[in-house]
Every structure is written in C-alpha cells, then in structure tokens.
Amino acid sequence: MLTSLLVANRGEIARRVLRTARRLNIRTIAVHSEADADLPFVREADEAVPIGPANPAQSYRNAEAVLAAAKATGAEAIHPGYGFLSENAAFAQAVLDNGLIWVGPGPEAIAAMGDKINARNLMAAAGVPVAPGTTDPATSAGAAVRAAEAIGFPVMVKAAAGGGGMGMAVANDADGLRAEYDKVRAFAERMFGDGSVLIERYFPRVRHIEVQILGLADGRVVALGERECSVQRRNQKLLEETPSPALTPEQRADLLTAAVRAGEAVAYRNAGTVECLFDPDAGRFYFLEMNTRLQVEHPITEAVFGVDLVEQQLRVASGLAPTFDPDALAVTGHAIEVRVNAEDPKRFLPGPGAITTWSEPAGEGVRVDSGYANGNIVTPNYDSLLAKLIVHGADRADALDRLRAAVAGFEVAGPKVNLPFFAELLDNPEFTSGDYDTGIVGRMRTKP
C-alpha cells in the first residue's frame, strides 16, 4: 500500500479522500489556495501546502504548483479527486513522468474518453449502444444543420471537449441550431480551448443513469451497480439514487454488461463512471460519456455495496487486489444522495457568504460528507457544493423517509442554501413515485 498521498483538490472530496488515507495509515498532504486556508480539509491533513491565490487557474489547476508541492513534501502518489486536474491526461502523464503514482486511470484512457466524439466512436466499435449523432465534429453551422436533418430534430448541441453539464444546448429546428451552434462553439473555445461541436439526438423524455466501474490491478473490469441521476438543473445533478427505480432486472443486466465492455475497450484501470441516457418509453439506453475519475455521487454506491471506493482506488494504484470478491457483489437496500449547494432554492443562483450556523443531521443510515464548518466563508471562486447528504435504507420508501428527516435536520445559515428545494422535491408525487425524468425540476419550477 502507498505510504504518502497528496490530494490535489479541495472541500468535501479532499476530506473524503483524506479520511480513507488516514484509516489506512497513509501520510496525507493537502494543497490549498489562499481562500481555502481555514477550511477543514487543510487542518485535517498531516501536512498542508499553499499553492496560490483563489483563482483556480493559479492554484488547483496549476499543474506545476501541485507537482512542486508533491516533490517538496515527498509525496509518493497524487489523488486528483474530481474536477480541476482529475481528467487532464497531460497532468496524469506529468505525474508519472515525475516518478509519482497516479491514483486514476492511465493518461491514454483519459485522453480517449475526454473527447466526446472520439469516445462515442470507440464505444460504437466496442458494441456499446450510442445515440444517433455525428462521428466527426460539425465544422460549421451549415454542417450542423445537415447533420441534424439526417439525425432528426430535436438535437443536442454539445462541446466535444466539455463536461459537467457545460457546453450543451437543445435545438428544435434549423434556425435554432444555427444560433445555438455559434454559442456552444464560442463557449467551448473559451472554457475548454477546443471549439469542436457534436450533434446528437435529443430525447425530450429521458433518464440519466450511470454505472460505477472499477478497473482492477489484475486487468479485470467490474461494475458496481448503477446510479439514477435524473434530478438536474442546467444539466447538472442535484440528487442521485441507487438502484435506479426505472430499470427491470434484464435492463440492468444489459446496462452493466455494456459498461464493463466500455471499460475493457480502453483497458480501464481504477474508478470510473459510464454515463448513459435511458429512454423509458422504448426501454433502451445509449452511451453518453465516460468520466475518468471518482464521481461526486460515489457514496451511494459505497452504501449499498459496503465498499470504500477510495480504498479500492488506492489499492489498484498500489497493484493490490480489491477488498471485495468481484464475483460476489450484491446490493443491500437503497441509497440516496442530495447535493447541498450554496444557492437559492428557486432559481439555483449562487449565494456565497459566511457560515453562521452549521448543524449536520445524524442517525442510523445517515452520512454527511461536508467541505465546510461553522465560521467558514463560502467564496464565489469555486463550485457551490457545500456538502453531500447521503441516506441508506432497507428499501426506497425507507430511504425517502430517512432523507426527509435528515433534510429537515440539516441547519445552515449565512449563505443561501438549496435544502428547501429538496424538502419540496421529497413531497413531489412524480419523484416519490419513481417515474420521473430529467425534466422534473423544470416542471416543478414552471407549474402554475
């Protein structure tokens, strides 16, 4: 097992990784920006290194600063968390080139999956279902329109190098596509340094379901169930649950098999997620993208399988076998996670500020992964995620009851917070029935 680990991230995911590393007696190193100096993850590490100002480009995305911190502290390995440098193939390669261990998939797999068009083509060749779409970038608005006419409107206009729900727009006709194409291309060039655009079939009623895969040290790829991620705002997730209430046993088996095939196609190692769109009317799923890192919502998978995914990541990186039997994986109960964000619960606009009250719920089946504590300041420099509230119950009804109580018992004052939205969602008949899709939040916000 590793002896020392630098966590190249911040907030709740940094605390999460540090917690497992400490349990395994691994010396821990945190890096932090000037704005984050007082956050819990900094004081919880064995050693903490400041790496720059609040601007992520000058701190958490500054590969040279992170590598310098690793060298200065004698770190043996780097865990990137999610976001920032986690899916940067060049950074992963630089970590390896500097004689360090990268806790993630190889740079080749990251690069292969980082471009949505290339990923779609690879998956299609591997026999993984993909939605109708372009196999090459649409190089102009006219080319995008011609592709859309062949695919059929409505279509999704997507940044090929994008991620996290960014760089996406729906077009219902040719005029709308021309306008959205220019916007998405400009956004992609500005945000990702790559203006390549993909045109793909848009499904008005669809569910977003993903599969947790783990590429083991011996070369095998296993699937640890699926997660339902259809409660979203602006294509970004707010709530996830597992198992998905949408799938039949046969559909689930097909989905997990396809996800393993996707991982095998790129010789995947370590933790990753195969994201899919599921058409509930046709009962068919389509590959969407692969996230080559640990997901925000990994705790619900941990809850139902009884597996510490961060520990498995560290074991794979160390060349060790997993702590579980890959041939005897079984789900126990139902788990749900909500993302407690510093944003207003109506329009979901950021609401940073100083935290004057912070009281987390507790009890059987309740877990909180938080990045902040009372007295901390939530700045506008980073993602609005404050904490993840996770519940695990005997079944979905039990998990929903526990989540209602936990949401009611989570007290945060100072910044705006979206907890009232979750209280509203948990009383929404469409959601509680389990028969919902990615349009549920929009319908809640446009109801009479």
Image (cartoon, grey):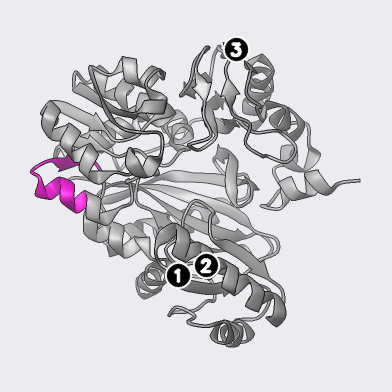
Query: Between 240 and 441, which is closer to the camera in this rendering?
Result: 441
Give the spatial CA distance, label 2 vs label 1: 7 Å
Q: Quadrant of residue 95?
A: top left
The image shows residue 101 at horizontal and vertical percentages of: 15, 41
Q: Please tell me the numbered disc located at residue 394.
A: none
Determine the secondary structure under disc 3: loop
- In the rendered structure, the answer to whether residue 17 lies left or right of residue 70 reads right
Query: Between 38 and 133, which is closer to the camera in this rendering?
Result: 38
Query: Hey, what amino acid is under mark 2?
Result: Ala
Query: Hey, what amino acid is under mark 3?
Result: Thr
Q: Which residues are magenta?
A: 92-103
Q: Is residue 298 above or below residue 392?
A: below
Q: Residue furthest left?
A: 99
Q: Please tell me the numbered disc located at residue 195.
A: 1
The image shows residue 29 at horizontal and vertical percentages of: 23, 25
- In the rendered structure, the answer to whether residue 399 lies left or right of residue 264 reads right
Residue assigned mark 2: 186
Q: Is residue 293 above or below residue 45?
A: below
Please say if the residues under marks 3 and 2 sit with CB atoms less than 8 Å apart. Answer: no
Q: Is residue 152 above or below residue 373?
A: below
- In the rendered structure, the answer to whether residue 417 lies left or right of residue 91 reads right
Which of disc 1 and disc 3 is earlier in sequence?
A: 1
Q: Residue at x 22, y 21 (%)?
A: 24
Which of disc 1 and disc 2 is earlier in sequence?
A: 2
Please say if the residues under marks 2 and 1 sit with CB atoms less than 8 Å apart. Answer: yes
Q: Quadrant of residue 260?
A: bottom left
